[in-house]
Image: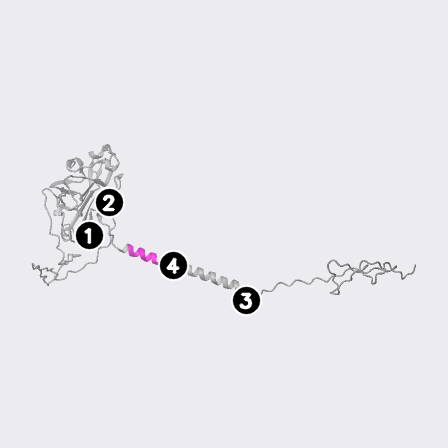
């Protein structure tokens, strides 16, 4: 057999053909790209495949040249938002403080009657203790009187003249307004009534009472029903217990807008029904009365309904507590207390109506 005899003489020695006898077959040699073989290709027979050494992978560069500035920009925005929030909070707090200061500087617009009504929602029983009086605002600045020389002529000529030469004893004066008729002078005297403001005496319809006094002394004229307060007539007070000025006494002949509140105290050494105890506190208020159907009440030195501020000060002097002035409503509250705080007297005095509320309390147990 000839050596040059080829099996299946098909031309070139391609893949799938037999080699000549004694020669090694060749298989689809690698493409010359750094001698790196391609996928699914075989190296030459008897040779080891070579691989291109791996190059270290270089980290990807940011696509934008300014990306490294983004954290700084975001940080700046966040800091700016925080600063704005702090400024807003400080402004709101400042406005809130200004509002609170303004509100506290304004005089109360509640009348004495409204304030008492809120406090009198239920009967309160407590041990015999001293009750603090309400804090009063500062008295208004003292003003000197000015001489009024001009006469005001209307249908009837009324000469309004105030002497302003010497008034060293007057701390404040009431302004005279030609369009408002001043309240008439009103003082009264009752036989047996002391002139001592701290005598704990009060005259009601001509009868003098010394606080505390038995409710039985006035029970025929002024009554109340414990059912109105959620109790029955067997409601009992223990020794030295008291009920604050929450019991509203009624009289069919009394103006419906007149308030007559009293407080009860058991001054004895044994439990007693409330109607068998004593009255230690009295509070009359005729501010909103539509008529004169209310009790005649007189205090020491003749102070009564309609007494002016000047008459009160002439009788009792300056109050022991700082006077409270409700400018928007036009009234003063004067409170007098003795040195031992055993007795207090409070008056509501309107500029145009004079005294309209009288409140007296004796904290003594006998």
> Considering the numbered disc 3 on the image, is that residue within a helix, a strand or a loop?
loop
Q: Which mark is residue 332?
A: 1
Comes first in the chain, label 2 or label 4: 4
Comes first in the chain, label 2 or label 1: 2
Q: Which is nearer the eye, 18 or 212?
A: 18
> Considering the numbered disc 1 on the image, is that residue within a helix, a strand or a loop?
strand
**Magenta stretch: includes residue 91:** yes
Comes first in the chain, label 3 or label 4: 3
Position of residue 66 relative to residue 332, above or below, is below
Label 2: which residue? 117
Residue 269 showing in the rendered view: no
Q: Assess disc 4: are there few (<14), some (14-19) or many (≥20) residues with their C-alpha within 10 Å of its C-alpha.
A: few
Q: Assess disc 2: are there few (<14), some (14-19) or many (≥20) residues with their C-alpha within 10 Å of its C-alpha.
A: few
Residue 141 horizontal side relative to residue 208, left or right: right
Label 4: which residue? 90
Q: Could you tell me if the residues under marks 3 and 2 are in contact, i.e. CB atoms within 8 Å? A: no
Q: Which is the main secondary structure of the residues drawn in magenta? A: helix
Give the Cα distance between marks 2 and 1: 19 Å
> Considering the numbered disc 2 on the image, is that residue within a helix, a strand or a loop?
helix
């Amino acid at each position: 057999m000839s050596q040059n005899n080829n099996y299946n003489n098909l031309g070139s020695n391609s893949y799938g053909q037999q080699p000549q006898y004694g020669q090694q077959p060749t298989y689809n040699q690698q493409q010359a790209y750094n001698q790196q073989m391609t996928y699914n290709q075989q190296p030459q027979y008897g040779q080891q495949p070579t691989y291109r050494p791996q190059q270290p992978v270089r980290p990807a560069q940011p696509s934008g040249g300014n990306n490294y500035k983004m954290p700084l920009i975001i940080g700046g925005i966040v800091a700016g938002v925080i600063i704005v929030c702090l400024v807003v909070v400080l402004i709101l707090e400042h406005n809130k403080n200004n509002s609170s200061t303004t509100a506290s500087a304004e005089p109360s617009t509640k009348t004495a009657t409204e304030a008492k009504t809120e406090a009198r929602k239920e009967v309160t029983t407590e041990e015999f203790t001293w009750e603090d009086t309400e804090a009063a605002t500062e008295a208004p600045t003292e003003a000197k009187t000015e001489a009024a020389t001009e006469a005001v002529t209307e249908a009837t000529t009324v000469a309004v003249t105030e002497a302003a030469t010497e008034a060293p004893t007057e701390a404040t004066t009431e302004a005279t307004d030609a369009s408002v008729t001043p309240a008439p002078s009103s003082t009264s005297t009752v036989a047996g009534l002391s002139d001592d403001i701290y005598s704990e005496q009060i005259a009601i319809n001509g009868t003098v009472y010394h606080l505390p006094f038995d409710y039985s002394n006035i029970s025929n004229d002024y009554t109340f029903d414990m059912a109105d307060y959620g109790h029955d007539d067997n409601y009992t007070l223990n020794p030295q217990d008291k009920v604050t000025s929450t019991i509203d006494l009624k009289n069919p002949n009394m103006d419906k807008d007149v308030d007559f509140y009293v407080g009860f105290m058991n001054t004895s050494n044994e439990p007693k029904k409330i109607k068998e105890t004593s009255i230690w506190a009295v509070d009359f208020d005729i501010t909103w009365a539509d008529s004169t159907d209310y009790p005649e009440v007189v205090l020491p030195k003749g102070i009564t309904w309609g007494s002016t501020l000047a008459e009160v000060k002439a009788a009792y002097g300056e109050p022991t507590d700082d006077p409270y002035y409700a400018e928007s409503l036009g009234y003063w509250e004067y409170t007098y207390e003795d040195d031992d705080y055993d007795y207090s007297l409070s008056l509501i005095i309107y500029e145009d109506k004079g005294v309209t509320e009288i409140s007296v309390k004796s904290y003594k147990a006998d």
